[in-house]
Image: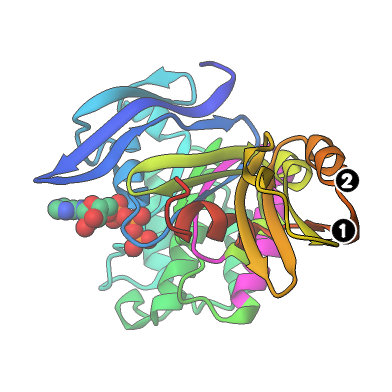
Amino acid sequence: MKDYALWTEGLRKQFGKTRAVDGIDLQVPHGSIYAFLGPNGAGKTTTIKMLLGLLRPDGGKFGLLDHEGPPDPRTLARIGYVPEIPGLYGFMTTRELVDFCRRLHPAWDHDLVDRYLDLFGLPRDRKVGGFSRGMKSQLALVLALAHRPELLILDEPTTGLDPLARKNFLQTVLAEVAQAGQTVLLSTHLLEDAQRVADTVGIIKSGRLVLQKSMDEIKAGEKKVRVVFQHQPPPWLQEIPGVRGLEQEGSAVVLTVTGDISVVLERVRTVPLFALEVIDLSLEQVFHEYATAPGRS
Ligand code: ATP
């Protein structure tokens, strides 16, 4: 598993009768920005907490960087983490908190901290307790990045950020992180953001990983084919290899296809057609197909 900056094998966690994480195999390549997606309650935060040693798994294995199991202090020093709700010492000012964290990390990059505090326009001398949710998220991000971690784990980091802060995060911070070859596990509900920055995507639904692919594989291998037949649609459409779903849209039949589309086109063209169109799917549509459409997991 040393090809991956982060991996899990059959990772499981149950709360009472709820199978929060039900045997997932994550594979996050070194240097990738991995969008970890899923509807509310899918198991993203539970997974992240297990990875960081904050929750004990009920089964399975996992590793971060070159360490197997919950990170030891040496591995933790190479990881940056921004939780869903950042717990920052509210009685400190930004400056005091930065100084406090700086003492914990020998590899602290103070110039980077200064630059990002300016980028987000965060006040140095105000108490953090009085910050808005978005300001706290921004500060948590800056602190998580300051020791230039090899692996960044971000649990919904853009929730509560205004459009400018979100743009700064995506276009400056994440771009710099990607350029430096750092790996990012990014849990988010903002699919447009994920589409823009991620090169790998994992979708979790009810504790199970329902899709894990590179963005290129998704672009090449997840399509819709819209067909208007001259006569009744043939009954074998669903049986063509790669066809995952079929919907009627007015006079057209729309096929959802995974994998090699040429097989589907070849078969469909054996019957008389009025029109045929291949449609690329956005990440939002792919998410809908895998995570929210009924019976598709
Ligand atoms: P969201 O997108 O809403 O943040 P998520 O994908 O992060 O959701 P989790 O927070 O991991 O989902 O929750 C997965 C499931 O586990 C949910 O059904 C949740 O109610 C349950 N769960 C999580 N933590 C606990 C807990 N401490 N006790 C009981 N159930 C829990």
Judge by depth and name the residue closer to the eye, 187 or 141: 187
The answer to whether mark 1 is within 8 Å of ligand 1 is: no
The residue wearing badge 1 is: 276
Dot 1 amino acid type: Leu
User: Whole-percent x and y of residue 104?
Assistant: 37, 43
Residue situated furthest left in the rendering: 16
User: Whole-percent x and y of residue 100?
Assistant: 35, 55
Mark 1 is surrounded, within 10 Å at the Cα level, by few (under 14), some (14 to 19) or many (20 or more) other residues, namely some
Residue situated furthest top in the rendering: 2
Judge by depth and name the residue closer to the eye, 30 or 140: 30
Examine the rendering and report whether any part of residue 157 can be seen.
Answer: yes
Check residue 25 in the rendering and tell me which mark sits there, or answer none.
Answer: none
Residues at discs 1 and 2 in contact (Cβ within 8 Å): yes
Q: Image check: 5 left or right of 72?
A: right
The answer to whether mark 2 is within 8 Å of ligand 1 is: no
Residue visible at 54% across and 60% down in the picture: 288
Dot 2 amino acid type: Arg
Residue 60 belongs to the span the image colors magenta: no
Residue visible at 71% across and 36% down in the picture: 259
User: Whole-percent x and y of residue 205?
Assistant: 40, 49
In this rendering, the answer to whether 43 lies above or below 118 is above
Q: Image check: 131 left or right of 193?
A: left
Label 1 or label 2, whichever comes before in sequence order = 2
Judge by depth and name the residue closer to the eye, 287 or 167: 287
Q: If the picture is divided into quarters, which one holds ligand 1?
A: bottom left
The residue wearing badge 2 is: 269
Secondary-structure class at tag 1 = strand
Mark 2 is surrounded, within 10 Å at the Cα level, by few (under 14), some (14 to 19) or many (20 or more) other residues, namely few
Quarter of the image for the C terminus: give it: top left
- Of badges 1 and 2, nearer the viewer stands 2
Q: Which residues are magenta?
A: 165-190
